[in-house]
Image (tube, rainbow, N blue to C red):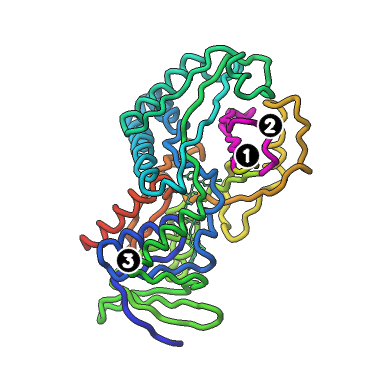
């Protein structure tokens, strides 16, 4: 076993969260070490819907809690949407070649659980929030079925009332992780792929953490004054490497996507039979369709299930009745596990806040969960502020 040099901060996990924390710490002149057991961005951060967005769905959730007089949860979701919209604007300026505005059509049907005017009101509010954050692209309201069909002629006609074209941002999630790591390296950080963290402990005498890693069969020990666990859906497994823990920080919710040859001129936001929203996102001639939600605790072995693929294909068949969809047309599929911050009380997966959370355990280690692609910058600033204060 070889021992190597000492760092100010060591970060475990090279997804969007770990990359952003390493980048933020390096930009403040700290000596940073980033350790990733596989390739950078190979976890959840490369299995997303590829959107940098505020999340219209979370705005609806804010309304849902408001109507039930659960004002704290309502405000949490509302402010999450606003800060995500603001982050989207900032990220578009810092990575203009990786994050670009992308129009998405939200068709409105008579069968929708929300009325047309409620949807117009919600999307207008979303547009006003985006405008306030500096996005000058306001939603475009399509007040008749003909106008919606002009955008996507193959859409289901029965019950169609109109639609809204929203502006979100499309990114290449994995390239974004690699870009942030590249800029951390340029600021002096050390980033090691294929470095599995086996164990860590705090050495009271030396006032450092000792982090034992394994790279291609060779074990090494690194030392760092501060330690951050940013292993996303593996956060609890990483903690369990050093101590028996009963409480869980993560609520692991898997989500799947399927990819088909592009079949619609516009990306769409649709509502499945169970009223869950799902996206059809056009990326370079491919339509990426998803996503789903199911609790799944093993992020090392996550694949789209047959049931998930059937659910997505059936949802497409409903909205595009003239296209003969089948599972044979799936070019690619993938699944990832959302590392949501586990709520104190039992909640439905689609009602859990998507705000990140930072926990500190008795050994002083920071554990960060629930970081979305969209809010990675804000989460990283918070984590590094806390490590610096300490
Ligand atoms: C289906 C789906 C769609 C999504 N769509 C969007 C979207 O459109 N927009 C958006 O903003 N967000 C989206 N998200 C959320 C977002 O993708 C995740 O919240 C985010 O990628 C989590 O990043 P992370 O760095 O915390 O975790 P990860 O990306 O999983 O990174 C954790 C890393 O830790 C490494 N690791 C684990 N254990 C160890 C160890 N012992 N030693 C060293 N390394 C270790 C893993 O290999 C992994 O690379 C989506 C998520 C899902 C599942």
Q: Residues within 10 Å of mark 3 (few under 14, many from 20)?
A: many
Q: Nearer the viewer, mark 2 or mark 3?
A: 3
Relative depth, front residue between 311 and 361? 311
Could you tell me which residue is drawn at 41 percent across and 81 percent down? 221
The percent coordinates of residue 125 (x first, y second) are 38, 23
The percent coordinates of residue 235 (x first, y second) are 45, 59
Mark before the other along the chain sequence, 1 or 3: 3
The residue pinned by badge 3 equals: 187
Q: Residues within 10 Å of mark 2 (few under 14, many from 20)?
A: many
Residue 188 lies left or right of residue 287; in this view the side is left
CA gap between label 2 and label 3 equals 46 Å
Residue 316's disc number: 2
Is ligand 1 within 8 Å of the beta carbon of the residue shown at mark 2? no
Relative depth, front residue between 59 and 105? 105
CA gap between label 1 and label 3 equals 37 Å
Could you tell me which residue is drawn at 42 percent across and 69 percent down? 191
**At numbered mark 2, what does the secondary structure look like: helix, strand or loop?**
helix
Determine whether label 2 and label 1 are within 8 Å by CB: yes
Residue 263 lies left or right of residue 202; in this view the side is right
Callout count: 3
Is residue 157 placed above or below 214 in the rendered structure?
above
Is ligand 1 within 8 Å of the beta carbon of the residue shown at mark 1? no
Determine whether label 1 and label 3 are within 8 Å by CB: no
The percent coordinates of residue 84 (x first, y second) are 38, 39
The residue pinned by badge 1 equals: 289
The percent coordinates of residue 352 (x first, y second) are 45, 40
In the image, the segment drawn in magenta is 259-283
**At numbered mark 3, what does the secondary structure look like: helix, strand or loop?**
loop
The residue most toward the bottom is: 1
Relative depth, front residue between 291 and 296? 291
Q: Nearer the viewer, mark 1 or mark 3?
A: 3
Q: Which quadrant does the C terminus fall into?
A: bottom left
């Amino acid at each position: 076993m070889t021992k190597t040099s000492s760092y100010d901060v060591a970060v475990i996990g090279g997804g969007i969260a770990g990359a952003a924390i390493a980048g933020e710490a390096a930009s403040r002149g700290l000596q940073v070490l980033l350790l990733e057991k596989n390739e950078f961005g190979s976890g959840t951060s490369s299995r997303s819907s590829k959107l940098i967005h505020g999340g219209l769905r979370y705005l609806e959730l804010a309304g849902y809690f408001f109507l039930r007089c659960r004002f704290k949860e309502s405000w949490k979701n509302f402010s999450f949407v606003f800060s995500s919209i603001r982050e989207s604007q900032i990220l578009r300026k810092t990575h203009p070649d990786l994050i670009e505005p992308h129009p998405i059509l939200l068709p409105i049907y008579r069968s929708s659980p929300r009325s047309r005017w409620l949807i117009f009101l919600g999307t207008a509010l979303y547009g006003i929030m985006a405008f306030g954050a500096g996005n000058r692209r306001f939603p475009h309201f399509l007040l008749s079925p003909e106008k919606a069909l002009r955008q996507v002629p193959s859409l289901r006609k029965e019950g169609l009332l109109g639609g809204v074209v929203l502006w979100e941002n499309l990114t290449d999630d994995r390239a974004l992780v690699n870009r942030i790591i590249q800029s951390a390296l340029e600021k002096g950080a050390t980033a090691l792929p294929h470095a599995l963290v086996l164990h860590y402990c705090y050495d009271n005498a030396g006032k450092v953490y000792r982090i034992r890693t394994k790279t291609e069969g060779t074990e090494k020990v690194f030392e760092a004054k501060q330690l951050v666990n940013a292993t996303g859906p593996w956060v609890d497994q990483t903690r369990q490497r050093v101590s028996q823990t009963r409480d869980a920080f993560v609520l692991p919710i898997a989500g799947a996507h399927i990819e088909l040859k592009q079949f619609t001129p516009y990306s769409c936001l649709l509502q499945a039979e169970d009223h869950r929203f799902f996206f059809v996102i056009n990326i370079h001639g491919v339509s990426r369709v998803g996503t789903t939600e199911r609790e799944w605790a093993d992020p090392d072995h996550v694949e789209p299930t047959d049931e998930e693929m059937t659910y997505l294909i059936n949802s497409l068949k409903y909205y595009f009745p003239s296209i003969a969809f089948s599972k044979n047309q799936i070019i690619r599929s993938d699944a990832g596990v959302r590392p949501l911050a586990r709520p104190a009380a039992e909640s439905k997966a689609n009602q859990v806040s998507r705000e990140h959370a930072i926990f500190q355990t008795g050994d002083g280690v920071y554990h960060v969960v629930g970081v979305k692609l969209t809010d990675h910058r804000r989460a990283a600033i918070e984590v590094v502020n806390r490590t610096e204060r300490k």
